[in-house]
């Protein structure tokens, strides 16, 4: 395939706070800049904007994530203006609400429209499937796992030849056990109020019900008294859910062994500070980036046996897969690690299949393909 000399990409998402979608946006921007292209992002802002602009990308702050239909014409017009003024060659939508405006704007200006289907969206009310369908309307659709690709084809009847499977990538230089000092690990222990001889179970995910925090707390009640469960993640305003977690832990007699430290900035050190990592989601994860990052750090991972985790965790080799919602099975899987477990081999597997570099290279290839399809 002929490589376009230079092109400009506009990525569109609601905000640039912490999360897999946001981090992938930054990583792709870094790759675009490194390869001599233009990287532009429009979002409502957030903690990752500074990192994005330091990489050389341009950020526009706008409320593109609004779900108000009355504001849709304004959002379409604003995006059309950005496309024209910045000579955008590809529009890449990463979330449903801004994708509707981005799609209309891209069509109006005659530029390719790419989407990334990041998650398995629920369809709990009438019309939700149509609302979700915008993420399957890209000229090319990136799915972050084979599980997601199968879902897109089955649910939205998207032809397989328009889908490109690109797993989220792990930064192998950042998530490297050799790069984490003892001081960084001790700082995390201090933040979590745990002792070096505690058995630490880490559940790294935002505090929302489907991420499985209640399942992990019930499993904690079945684990030895020296075990501490750290649910590290942003509550994102869900105060009622946080109170529910504390009440559950108290009712099970494990309140003193539960930690809710909020958003964790130094995730490589957090993984090193833990003895086990768990991702016990009750709904299928589209991919499961934290499970991949934990394995890159040489940590044994116990995950729910559905969704993208089935690809990420090599069952009984780099971790264990357990039935979703089964706290007894989760507790048993967290207790022991096979003597055959090889953390170095686990890291090598992640580097081979799920690296940041692989994601960046494959995504830029999608942009080139979309541009060439448009020019035919």
Image (cartoon, rainbow, N blue to C red):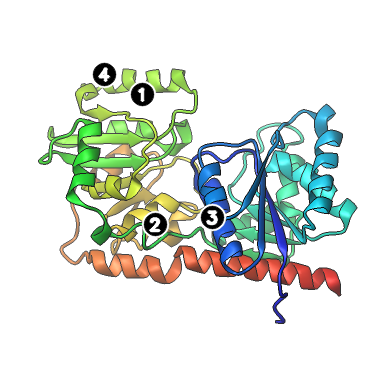
Looking at the image, the residue that sits furthest to the bottom is 1
| Circle 2/circle 1 CB separation < 8 Å | no
| Circle 3/circle 1 CB separation < 8 Å | no
Q: CA distance from mark 1 to mark 4?
A: 9 Å
* Horizontal side, residue 176 vs residue 237: left or right: left
* Horizontal side, residue 264 vs residue 335: left or right: right
Rendering coords of residue 159 (x, y %): 74, 64
Looking at the image, the residue that sits furthest to the right is 108
On the image, numbered disc 2 is attached to which residue?
292
On the image, numbered disc 1 is attached to which residue?
245
Q: Which mark is residue 210?
A: none
Q: CA distance from mark 2 to mark 3?
A: 24 Å
Query: Which residue: 45% across, 51% down?
Result: 288
Chain-order first, disc 2 or disc 3: 3
Chain-order first, disc 2 or disc 4: 4
On the image, numbered disc 4 is attached to which residue?
250
Of 54 and 3, which appears nearest the observer?
54
Can you tell which of label 3 and label 4 is closer to the viewer? 3
Secondary structure, mark 3, is: loop
Rendering coords of residue 282 (x, y %): 45, 40
Secondary structure, mark 2, is: helix
Q: Is residue 108 visible?
A: yes
Can you tell which of label 3 and label 1 is closer to the viewer? 3
């Amino acid at each position: 395939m002929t490589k376009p000399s230079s092109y400009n990409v506009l990525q569109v998402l609601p905000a640039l706070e912490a999360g897999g979608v946001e981090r992938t946006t930054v990583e792709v921007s870094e790759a675009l800049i490194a390869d001599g292209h233009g990287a532009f992002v429009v979002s409502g802002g957030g903690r990752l904007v500074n990192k994005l602009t330091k990489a050389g990308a341009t950020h526009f702050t706008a409320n593109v994530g609004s779900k108000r239909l009355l504001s849709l014409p304004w959002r379409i017009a604003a995006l059309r203006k950005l496309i024209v003024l910045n000579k955008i060659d590809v529009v890449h939508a990463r979330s449903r609400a801004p994708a509707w405006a981005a799609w209309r704007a891209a069509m109006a200006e005659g530029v390719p429209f790419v989407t990334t289907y990041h998650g398995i969206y629920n369809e709990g009310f009438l019309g939700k499937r149509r609302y979700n369908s915008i993420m399957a309307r890209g000229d090319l659709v990136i799915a972050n796992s084979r599980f997601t690709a199968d879902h897109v084809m089955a649910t939205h009847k998207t032809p397989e030849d328009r889908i490109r499977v690109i797993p989220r990538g792990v930064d192998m230089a950042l998530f490297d056990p050799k790069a984490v000092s003892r001081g960084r690990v001790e700082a995390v222990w201090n933040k979590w109020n745990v002792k070096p001889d505690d058995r630490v179970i880490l559940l790294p995910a935002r505090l929302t019900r489907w991420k499985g925090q209640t399942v992990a707390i019930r499993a904690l009640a079945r684990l030895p008294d020296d075990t501490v469960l750290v649910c590290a993640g942003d509550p994102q305003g869900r105060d009622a859910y946080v109170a529910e977690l504390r009440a559950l832990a108290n009712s099970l007699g494990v309140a003193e062994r539960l930690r809710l430290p909020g958003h964790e900035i130094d995730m490589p050190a957090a993984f090193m500070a833990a003895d086990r990592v768990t991702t016990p989601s009750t709904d299928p994860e589209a991919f499961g980036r934290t499970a991949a990052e934990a394995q890159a750090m040489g940590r044994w991972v116990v995950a729910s046996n559905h969704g993208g985790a089935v690809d990420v965790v090599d069952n009984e080799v780099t971790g264990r897969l357990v039935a979703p919602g089964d706290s007894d099975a989760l507790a048993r899987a967290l207790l022991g690690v096979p003597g055959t477990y090889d953390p170095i081999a686990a890291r090598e597997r992640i580097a081979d299949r799920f690296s940041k570099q692989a994601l960046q290279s494959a995504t830029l290839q999608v942009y080139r393909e979309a541009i060439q399809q448009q020019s035919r």
